[in-house]
Image (tube, helix red, strand yellow):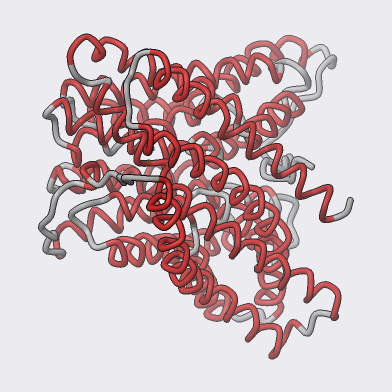
Amino acid sequence: MGNRTILLEKLRESVSSVMPIVLIVAAMCLLFIPVSTDLMLAFVIGSVMLIVGMGLFSLGADSSMTPIGNHMGAKITKSRKLWVVLLISFLLGVAITVAEPDLTVLADNVPHINSTVLIITVSAGVGLFLVICMLRILLGVQLRYLLIAFYAGVFLLAAFVDPDYLSVAFDSGGVTTGPMTVPFIMALGVGVSSIRSDRNAEADSFGLVALCSIGPILAVLILSFIYEADSGSAAAANVSSFPDTVELGRGYLRAIPHYMAEVALALGPIAAIFLVFQAISLHLRRLPFLKIIIGLVYTYVGLVLFLTGVNVGFSSLGVVLGGELSGGWARYLLVPVGMLMGWYIISAEPAVHVLNKQVEDISAGAISAKAMGLSLSIAIAAANGLAMVRVLTGISILWFLVPGYIIALALSFFVPQMFTAIAFDSGGVASGPMTATFMLPFAMGAAEAAGTSVLTDAFGLVALVAMMPLITVQVMGVIYVLKTRGAAEAGAVEVYGDEDIIELWEAAS
C-alpha cells in the first residue's frame, strides 16, 4: 500500500473522528445557541486544519514512532546490560511524551501550572514508569498486583493533595496514552521482551500503557506539594475573537510560526536520540532510514496544523458553547448534549473498532464486536454525562474515580489476565484527541459560566472517560467466562489463556 493510499485512509479516519462533533456543534449553533460569526468561521477553518493535521500526524507516527520503538527496543536488549535498558527506556519515555499532542493541549488549558513545567513533570512520570515496565517484563511480575499497589498509592496520596491539582493529575494520566505514545511504548515493550525466552515473555509486554498512565498521575500529585502555583485566570476565559476575515486569517498565520517552533522543540529530543542511535549502533539501510525521516516530517507538519487549528478556532467554540449551555433554560441540555457528544466521539474513534474486533476474536465470538461497541458507547456517554453533572454540582472527582477503580481492580480477579491487560491498556482509546481538544474546553466554559470551579470541576473529564473502558472491557470478559464455561468443558470453544497474545494497537489499515 503506497503512502498516498495510506494518507487517504488516515484522512478518512480523521474525518470520521472530527465530523460528528462538527455536525453536532453546527446544528446547535445554527438552530438555537447563538455564537458570533467570526467564531463559527474560525471553528470551521480549525476543523479542517484538525482533520488534515490528524491525518498527517497519524501517518507519520505509524511510519516513524513504531519503527523507532521496535529498532531501539531490540537494540538495547542486545547489550544484556540492565542499566542500559533502564536508562534508555527512561530517556525514550520522556522524549516521546514531550511530543504527545494531547498533553500539549491539556498543558495549554491548565491555568495555574506553567505548561512547560507540567509537560516535563508528566514526561518524567512516564519515563519512570516505563523503567518499571521494563523491570516487570524482565522479571515477569504479574500486572494485576502492580496495578493494585500503585493505584492504592495514588488514592492514598490524593487524600492529602490540593484539590486544584487533583483532577488535573488524573487527566494527565489520560492524555499521555495518545496516538504518539501508545504505538511507541508498545513497540518498545515487544522489543525488550525478546530478552526472555519463556512462553510468557511476549504476553508480559502487555500492560505497558496501563502502567505508564499511572506515572503522570503520581508525578502531578507530588508536584502539588513542591510547586508554587502561578497566578492568572482560567484558560476558559481565553477565547479568540476576530473583527473581520482578514484579521481571522492573520490570526492563523501568526499562530503557525509559534507552533512550528513549539513542535520542533517537542519532536527534537526523540529525533536526536534516534539519529545518535543510528550513527552509533543501528546502522539502518538507506531506505528504512529515509522512511523514518519522512515519517518524522509528516509527524511535524501534522502536529503544527493540529495544534494551530485546535488553539485558534476549534477549542474556542467549545468554551463558548459550554458557557451558553450552562445558563438559563439551556442548562437542562448540558448533560444530554455531553452524553450525545460522548456517544459519537467513541463511535468514530478508529482504535475503538480495532479494540472491538480483537475482543470478538479472543472471545471466539462469545462477545461480538457490535455488543462491545454498544457497551463502550454507553459507557463513554455516561462518563461525559457524569462530567457535566460535576460541572453543575461541584461533586469531587474522587466520588467517581475511587469506586470506579475499585470495581475495575476487583474485576481483574474474575477474568483472564489478557482481558485485564487489554482493559487497562485501552483506557487511552476512549480519551482520544476529541476529548482533550473539544470536550475539555466545553466543560471549562460550562464550569466558568455556571460559577463552579474550572480546576476542580471541569478538569477530570478526561479521567472519567479513560476509566470507563477498564470496567467495560472486563465486564465483557466476565460475560465471556460465563458464556464459555460450559462450552469449554465440552471442548466446543477454545478458551484463551493468560499467555495468549492479542495485538490491540495494530494498524487498522
Q: Residue at x 13, y 30 (%)?
A: 452
Figure check: 41 above or below 365: below
Q: Nearer the viewer, residue 458 or 261?
A: 261
> As drawn, is 285 to the left or to the right of 180?
right
- Image coordinates of residue 405 in percent, x first then y, are 37, 32
Quadrant housing the C terminus: top right
Figure check: 276 above or below 232: below
Q: Residue at x 41, y 13 (%)?
A: 31
Q: Residue at x 44, y 25 (%)?
A: 25
Q: Residue furthest bottom?
A: 280
- Image coordinates of residue 379 in percent, x first then y, are 47, 20
- Decide if residue 196 is in sight here: no
> As drawn, is 389 to the left or to the right of 380?
left
Figure check: 52 above or below 192: above
Q: Quadrant of residue 20?
A: top right
- Image coordinates of residue 481 in percent, x first then y, are 64, 18
> As drawn, is 460 to the left or to the right of 186?
left
Q: Nearer the viewer, residue 8 or 158?
A: 8
Q: Quadrant of residue 384?
A: top left
Q: Residue at x 72, y 9 (%)?
A: 486
Q: Nearer the viewer, residue 413 or 244?
A: 244
Q: Quadrant of residue 344?
A: top right
> As drawn, is 459 to the left or to the right of 78?
left
- Decide if residue 23 is in sight here: yes
Total of numbered circles in the picture? Answer: 0
- Image coordinates of residue 244 in percent, x first then y, are 37, 45
Q: Residue furthest right?
A: 1
